[in-house]
Image (cartoon, helix red, strand yellow):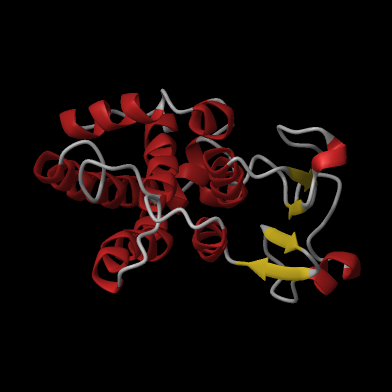
Amino acid sequence: MGGLFHVGDIMLKIYGHAGSINVRKVLWTCVELGIPFERIDWGGPTRSLADPEFQKLNPIGMIPVVEDNGQLFRESNSIVRYLAAREGRHDLLPNTPAERAQVEKWMDWQVSDFNNTWRYVFMGTVRKRPDFQDPQQSAASWEKFCAAVGIIDRELSRTGAYITGSAFTCADIVIGLSIHRWKSIPMERPDCAAVEAYYERLCKREGFQLYGRDGGA
């Protein structure tokens, strides 16, 4: 357990194991915001999410859960938005409705449509799960995943450095981690020059170095 800061400074608690892509969204966000935190390991090999102690934190039984001044928050993208708004970081999450919607539409797509494309192929090739080893389903999942990355590639070619334009936002945290997952799969990838340049830009950010590129697949 632990974060980037001295234990005496810690206010925010993050429940979840660091191998989870959804937990890493929150960890990366905390680095971007400079928020002290403590990570308490749940959902790894030793602490089951079915444990009644964890169910008290989140009856849905999923990670991450964030505890902030006695309040509990769940759903990774919702937590990312909450923390950015709490810190008044309008560069990461704009406060005008139209600009904010441009960020949130990509966050919503990532957690729904985009996530659903890579689950089978990732679980089979990277996690080596025995129940995800059907070659046809793996190939279909990879094709859908690459098609979704192609959407991002075309958007980046249009918008520039980041998914909504020239500025890094919360959308890049969640999209960026999914792109890292795409690059972690040991299969031949199509040429996506804009995505590759985007990934290199993300690799220069401290939070991504700690919890994205070097934080696991």
Tell me which residue sits at (58%, 28%) in the image. Answer: 210
* Left or right of 182 in this view: 126: right
User: Where the N terminus falls, by quadrant?
Assistant: top right
| Residue 45 coordinates in the image, percent (x, y) | 80, 44
Residue 38, position in %: x, y? Answer: 78, 44
38 relative to 65, above or below: above
Give the quarter of the image for residue 168: top left
Residue nearer the viewer, 92 or 20? 92
| Residue 191 in sight here | no
Coordinates of residue 48 in the picture (x, y in percent): 82, 57
Q: Residue, x 28% and y 43% (percent of image)?
A: 167
Q: Residue at x 45, y 42 (%)?
A: 177
Taking the view exactly as shown, the residue that stands out farthest to the bottom is: 59
Residue at the outermost left position? 158
**Residue 162 found in image quarter:** top left
Total labels: the figure holds 0
Reply above or below: 42 against 167. below
Residue 87 in sight from this viewpoint: yes
Q: Residue at x 18, y 33 (%)?
A: 194
Left or right, 155 with reference to 59: left
Nearer the observer, 165 or 140: 165
